[in-house]
Image (cartoon, helix red, strand yellow):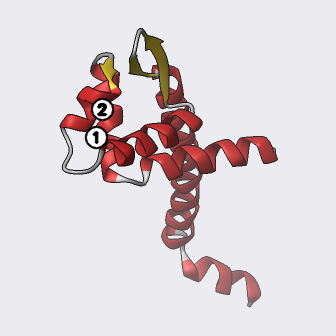
């Protein structure tokens, strides 16, 4: 269970940053060199490399070498696991809301009639 929690923490930490989400969108659409990714942002190459490393550690991105280039591609299965986690949380909250709705819609007089 701790391993699952650690994985969820890493995934959501990686997705918490706007630049990393944008990088992930790009690499899910197709493989890009880290250099090409860095050219799209107003930050240093090293900063983009760090963002890529966070995504890679979270398992959202896969890097491979091709000659001198590092190529990055998105891992669709990892993105699906994030979606699955969010769906699970949504189901928990929908269940709670349904119970609250049930309590609110119950007849308050029916309880007092039973006490008399």
How many C-alpha atoms fall within 10 Å of the one at disc 2: few (<14), some, or many (≥20)?
few
Q: What residue is disc 1 on?
A: 22
Q: How many marks?
A: 2
Between 110 and 83, the residue placed more toward the observer is: 83
Q: Which element carries disc 1, helix, strand or loop?
A: helix
For the point 50% across and 72% down, which residue is it?
104
Query: Which corner quadrant of the image does residue 8 belong to?
Result: top right
Look at the numbered discs 1 and 2 and tell me whether their residues touch, using CB distance below 8 Å.
yes
User: Which of these two is toward me, 59 or 48?
Assistant: 48
Asked if 112 appears above or below 21 in the picture, the reply is below
Quadrant of the image containing the C terminus = bottom right
Residue at 49% across, 68% down: 105
**8 horizontally vs 25: left or right:** right
Residue 103 marker: none
Q: What residue is disc 2 on?
A: 25
Coordinates of residue 26 in the picture (x, y in percent): 27, 28
Q: Position of residue 63 (x, y in %)?
A: 48, 21
């Amino acid at each position: 269970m701790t391993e699952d929690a650690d994985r969820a923490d890493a995934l959501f930490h990686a997705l918490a940053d706007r630049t990393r989400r944008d990088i992930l969108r790009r690499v899910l659409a197709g493989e890009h060199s880290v250099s090409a990714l860095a050219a799209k942002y107003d930050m240093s190459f090293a900063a983009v490399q760090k963002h890529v490393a966070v995504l890679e550690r979270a398992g959202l991105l896969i890097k491979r070498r091709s000659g001198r280039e590092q190529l990055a591609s998105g891992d669709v299965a990892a993105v699906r696991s994030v979606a699955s986690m969010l769906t699970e949380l949504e189901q928990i909250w929908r269940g709670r809301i349904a119970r609250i709705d049930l309590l609110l819609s119950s007849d308050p007089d029916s309880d007092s009639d039973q006490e008399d």
